[in-house]
Image (cartoon, helix red, strand yellow):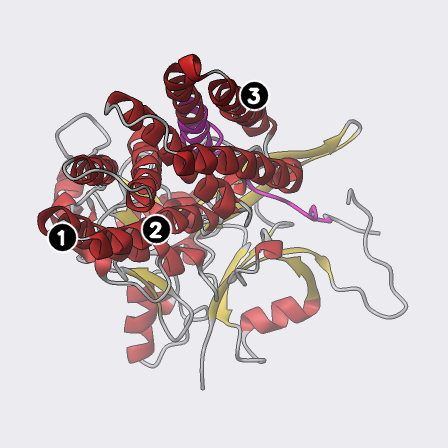
Amino acid sequence: MSYGPRPWLQLHWDQRAALNFIFGGTGGGFILLSAIVALPPRVGEAAMLLGLALVAAGLASVWMEIGRKLRAVHVFFNPFTSWMTRESFVAALLFGCGLAAIVLESPRFAAGAAVAALGFVYSQGRILRASKGIPAWREPTITWLIFWTAIAEGAGLFLIFSALAGLGIPTVAGGTLALAVVARGVAWSVYRGRVSADLAPQARAVLEPAGKQLYQLGAIVPLALLLTGGAIDAFAPGAAVLAGIAALAAGWRFKFVLVVRASFNQGFSLPRVPVRGGK
Amino acid sequence: MTKRWIMIADLRRCVGCQTCTAACKHTNATPPEVQWRRVLDMEVGEYPEVKRVFVPVGCMHCADPPCMHVCPSTATRKRADGIVTIDYDLCIGCGYCAVACPYQARYKIDKPSFAYGDAPMENEAKTFDWKRIGVATKCTFCSDRVDAGLAKGLTPGVDPEATPACVNSCIAGALHFGDREDPESNVSRLLEENEHFRMHEELGTDPGFYYLWDKAAKEGYERGGGVR
C-alpha cells in the first residue's frame, strides 16, 4: 500500500468516541447548571441523575471502542501525563460526588460534582489538544472551544429540563446559556483563525459549515429566542425549549464533525527532495 | 554512556523496492495491512521539474513521544536508549496513541487476520500472537535483535545479527541504524557528512529517524543540482 503526502481521515476514533464528547460534555454542563440553580427536592436529584446518566452513556460508548474492554481499569495508570487518565479520575470523582448528592441530598456534594464536571469537560478539551497527529484537534484553543460547547449544551438541556419540569425559566440558566453561546462563538472564531491554515482542505470543508452553525443555530437563534421569551411572557417556555434545542443541536453536530469527519491527519511532509547525481 | 538508537534513510539511494517492508513483516509476523516499516511512493514538484521519491516511514522513536504522554495505561514507554516500546499486556487498545502520533505509525487489529482468509498458513499459525489483538502495535526497532546482539558484544548497525531486519535487508544501502550519541558511529558520520532533515520537526517530537537528501555543503563547494 502506498501513501502520498496527502492527509487522510483517521479511523481509530469513530462515532463511539464522538459520543463521549457529546454526551459527556452535555452531561457535565448540565450537572453544573443543576448544582448552581436552586431546584426543589426530587427535581434536583433527578437532574443530577440525568447528568450522571449522560456522562455514563458517553463513557460506555467509548468503552465500546477500546480493543481490550476487560482491561479498562488500566486507564487509571497514567495520571502524570495522560489527559485520558485525568478525565477518568475526574469522572470517578464526579460520580462519587453526584451519587452522594443524590443519596444524601447534600448541596455540598452537588457543588463538588459541579466542580468535577467542570474538570471533566476541561479534560475532554485537553484530550483532543494532546492529539498531535490531528491538526484539527491539536490546536491549543480547542480546549476552550470544547469547554464552552459543553457549557452551552448543558445550559440548553437544562432549559428544556426546566420547562418540562414546570420550573419556568431560571434566570441563571438563561444567563448561562447566553454567556456560553457567545463564548462558544468567540472560541470558534479564535480557533478557526488559528487552525485554518493547518487543515487539510477536506477537513476545512466539513468543519467550516459546522462551525458556522455554532454562530447561526448555536448562538444567534438561542439569543433571539431568549430575548423574545424575555419580552413576551407567553412565549417564554416555548422559546426557552427551542433555544435549548438549538444550542444542543449546533454543539452536537459540531463535535460529531470535529471527531469523526474533520479528523484528517497531516500526511507526510518532504521538506527536501533528494539530490541525485550532482555536478 | 547513554545511547540513542536512530535510523537513517538515504533518500538518494532508496529505490522503493519494499524489501524492508517484506523483511519487517517476515521478522515481526505482522498481519495483512499492517506495515511497521512501509515505503511511501511520492511524486513531488511540478512539470517539468518532477521527481519520484521513495520515503521509508514508520515509528520515529521520538525523544519526546506524544504517544507515550497520552497513553493512559503506561503501555507505551521509552527506554533509556530511545526505543519506544508497547507493553501488550497493559495496552487497552483505546487508540489514543494512534491519533497522537504525527507519523501514522501505529496499528490496531481487533480480530485475527491472515493472508488467505480466516485460516492461517502454517507459518502464520506458528507466529500468531493473541497478545497483539485489540492493542496498539508498531515498529520496535527490532529491540529484541538489538538487545540480543548487545548481549553478545555485537554492535547494532554494524553487525547484522544486532541490527533491525529492515536495515539488513535494504538492497540499496539506503537504511542505516546506529547510536546517535556516539560521535564515531556509522550514523553520526553519515549525519556529519550529509544534509538531512526529520519529518514534521516543527511539532517538537525530536524524532529518531533522519532522512539524507544531499552531501553536506563544504566551504568552496556548492551542492549538486536538483529540485528543492
Residue at image point 30% right, 50% down: A114
Name the amino acid, label 2.
Answer: Lys
Q: Position of residue B207 (x, y in %)?
A: 52, 60
* Of marks 1 and 3, the one in the foreground: 1
Q: Is residue B190 left or right of residue A184?
A: right
Quarter the C terminus of chain B occupies? top right
Residue B7 vs B31, above or below: the answer is below
Judging by the rendered image, the residue that carries numbered circle 1 is A100
Q: Which residues, given as a range, are shown in magenta?
A: A249-275
Say whether residue A262 is magenta. yes
Residue at image point 41% right, 75% down: B155
Q: Position of residue B46 (x, y in %)?
A: 76, 29
Name the amino acid, label 1.
Answer: Ala
Residue B12 vs A33, above or below: the answer is below
What kind of element bears circle 1?
helix
Judging by the rendered image, the residue that carries numbered circle 3 is A216
Q: Which mark is residue B138?
A: 2
**Picture quadrant of residue B222:** bottom right
Q: Nearer the viewer, residue B92 or B171?
A: B92
Q: Nearer the viewer, residue A75 or B222?
A: A75
Asked if labels 1 and 3 share a chain, the reply is yes
Q: Residues within 10 Å of mark 3 (few under 14, many from 20)?
A: some
Q: Nearer the viewer, residue A101 or A267?
A: A101
